[in-house]
Amino acid sequence: MEEVETKKPGGGPPPRKSFLVRRGQKFAALFFWVVLLGGYQIYAWRAGLNPIGAARELADFMATNPLGWLIFLAVYAARPLVLFPATLLTLAAGFVFGPVLGVMLTIVGANTSAMVAYYVGRFFGGEVIEDDGEGFIARYTKRLRENSFETVLVMRFIFLPFDLVNYTAGFLQIRPLPFLLATALGSLPATLSFVLFGASVGREALAGSPDLDLRILAAAAALFVTSLALSRYFKHRERKRDAKKGET
C-alpha cells in the first residue's frame, strides 16, 4: 500500500512555537545558574568567608590531599560559574604546588575555565548583534568575529576582566579555536608572574610564617613588569588605531 501523506487542515507551515517554548532550555539553565551563584554566596556569607579566606582554606585543603592537583583543576574549571576571582586561585597554585607544577596546572585550569565561560556565553548568545550595524557595539562585534585571535589577544594583554572577555566572546559567537589560542598566549605572562609570586612565598604562608624565595620573587616581578609593558604598548596601539579610524 502507498503511504498517504497527512497534511494539517488548511495546509501551510506548522504553527510557530511560543517564545517560552523556544527559549525554555535557556531559561531553565539561567535559573540553575542563578541558584548556583546565589547558593555559593549564601554559603560564603554564613561561613564568614570572603574570597581570600575561601582561597586560603582551599589551598590548605589541597596541600594536605594527595588529589589536591585534581581538586584544583576541578575548582578552577567551575570557578567562572560562581565568579570566583581567578587571580586568587593562580596565587594558590604557586603556594601549594610550587613554580613548575603550579604553572602547568594553572595553564590547564585557566584555559579550561575560559572555555567553560565561553560555551556558557555561546549557549545564551546567538546572532544577537548583526554585523552590518553602524553603532560602536556592532562595529566592535564585527571586528571580534573577523579578527578573533588578534582582538582577544589584545584584550588579554591589556588586562580586561578575564571572565567578562570569556562570556562576551562566547555570547558574540567568536570562533572557539582562535579564542582559545589567544587566551592561552595572552594570559601567559600574567599567569607566570602570579604563580611565581605565590611560589616565592611557599606553603609556609598557610601557617602564617612565609619564607620568601628572593630569586623566584624577582622572576615574578620581572614578568609582572613585562605584562604591564605589554599592556601599555597594546593600549597605545589601540588608541592610535581608533584615532585613525576616527579621521577616516
Image (cartoon, grey):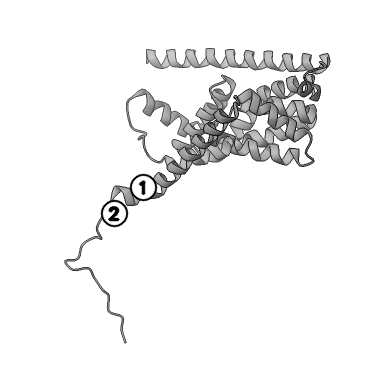
Q: Quadrant of residue 182?
A: top right
Q: Residue at x 76, y 25 (%)?
A: 95
Label ID, residue 17: 2
Where does label 1 land, which residue? 23
Observer-nearest of 47 and 79 = 47
Q: In this view, does 108 lie to the left or right of 34?
A: right
Image coordinates of residue 233 in percent, x first then y, are 58, 14
Observer-nearest of 60 and 239 = 60
Quadrant showing the C terminus: top left
Q: Distance between the residues labelled 1 and 2?
A: 10 Å
Q: In which quarter of the image is residue 30?
A: top left
Q: Can the viewer see residue 237 in this picture?
A: yes
Label ID, residue 170: none
Badge 1 element: loop
| Residue type for callout 2 | Lys
Q: Residue at x 53, y 15 (%)?
A: 235
